[in-house]
Image: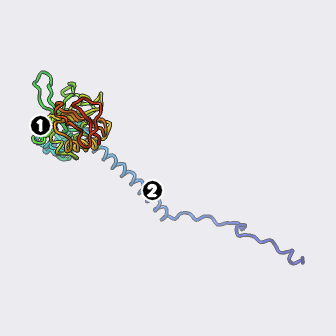
């Protein structure tokens, strides 16, 4: 190593150089931009709070709390009733049921009480009531649809006809086509209990409604002949008994889907022997049938029949 190379100082970085320059202070224009930005954010937050407060106040009015409204708004009279429904009820029924006084004001109405009046009919399953300022009350209802009818005695009054919905609710029914009501089967084997101004719902009615709906959809010619549907054996045995216009008894089981039972019934009525009085579809593919008298049974099994240990006037058909 020579002397010149030994005397060369070590390389240094610019970071080792002392920094004497102070950071530049914010300019007046920059401070103005910062202040304007902060004020803008604050104004936006206040606007959101005002909008939320206004929405809360409007919602409170819809719910029935009109204390915050000015006196002129509270005194505005109710002029119009509007109804929206999936059924047959109309504006005249709505006016009768709500029974509003002539001097009623839109904000003076107790919406929960009015809603209770609508639901008390039984025909209405759900109801929503909304104030539409300045003078309209809008009512949106969902109606129950009848699937059967029954005759009951309410208190000491004579027996009269009622309707039953798929959820078991029993109600009078208003506005239906009389021909449609006449096509509904009668219910038997039920004992509703009086409760308040009406009756307790019918238990297990959903399964009965499923049978009736599927029969009407898939086998309407058969359904049109059904006159009475008995629930007497539904709870204990899981059976629904149908009596037709001709007096035939058909027993459906609830442990199997109704569609194959309807198919077997249709086939049996088309191909079976005459004189059948009872058809029991609750045992699956082997369908016991009974005849009105022993003489009505065929002397020999017809094709598709197989005899088992049943009474002389009863035989099963296997599908």
Q: Is residue 7 left or right of residue 217?
A: right
Most extreme residue toward the right, as rendered?
A: 2
The circle drawn on residue 96 is: 1
Q: Is residue 45 left or right of residue 318?
A: right
**C-alpha gap between disc 2 and disc 1:** 59 Å
Q: Is residue 104 left or right of residue 303?
A: left
| Residue holding disc 2 | 38
Residue 187, image x, y percentages: 18, 32
Residue 276 picture quarter: top left
Looking at the image, which residue is at 77% across and 72% down?
Answer: 11
Residue 224, image x, y percentages: 15, 42
Tell me which label, 2 or 1, sits earlier in the chain.
2
Q: Is residue 61 visible?
A: no
Question: Local crowd at mark 1 within 10 Å, few (<14), some, or many (≥20)?
Answer: few
Q: Which of 184/288 is in front? A: 288
Question: Local crowd at mark 2 within 10 Å, few (<14), some, or many (≥20)?
Answer: few
Where, quadrant-wise, is the N terminus in this rendering? bottom right
Q: Is residue 29 visible?
A: yes
């Amino acid at each position: 190593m020579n002397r010149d190379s030994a005397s060369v100082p070590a390389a240094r970085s610019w970071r080792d150089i002392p920094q004497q320059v102070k950071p530049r202070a914010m300019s007046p224009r920059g401070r103005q931009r910062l202040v304007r930005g902060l004020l803008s954010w604050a104004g936006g937050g206040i606007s959101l709070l005002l909008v939320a407060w206004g929405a809360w106040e409007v919602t409170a009015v819809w719910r029935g709390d009109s204390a915050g409204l000015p006196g002129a708004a509270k005194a505005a009279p109710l002029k119009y009733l509007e109804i929206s429904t999936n059924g047959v009820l109309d504006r005249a029924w709505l006016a009768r049921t709500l029974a509003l006084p002539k001097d009623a004001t839109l904000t003076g109405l107790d919406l929960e009480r009015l809603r209770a009046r609508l639901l008390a009919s039984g025909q209405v399953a759900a109801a929503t009531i909304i104030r539409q300022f300045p003078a309209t009350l809008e009512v949106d209802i969902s109606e129950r649809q009848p699937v059967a009818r029954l005759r009951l005695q309410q208190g000491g009054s004579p027996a009269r006809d009622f309707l039953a919905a798929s959820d078991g609710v029993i109600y009078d029914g208003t506005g239906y086509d009389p021909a449609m009501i006449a096509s509904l089967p009668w219910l038997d084997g039920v004992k509703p209990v009086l409760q308040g101004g009406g009756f307790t719902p019918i238990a297990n009615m959903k399964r009965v409604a499923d049978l009736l709906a599927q029969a009407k959809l898939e086998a309407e010619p058969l359904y049109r002949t059904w006159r009475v549907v008995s629930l007497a054996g539904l709870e204990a045995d899981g059976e629904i008994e149908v009596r037709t216009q001709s007096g035939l008894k058909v027993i459906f089981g609830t442990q199997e889907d109704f569609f194959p039972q309807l198919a077997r019934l249709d086939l049996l009525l088309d191909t079976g022997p005459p004189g059948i009085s009872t058809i029991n579809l609750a045992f699956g593919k082997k369908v016991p049938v009974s005849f009105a008298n022993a003489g009505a049974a065929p002397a020999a099994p017809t094709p598709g029949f197989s005899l088992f240990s049943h009474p002389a006037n009863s035989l099963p058909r296997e599908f």
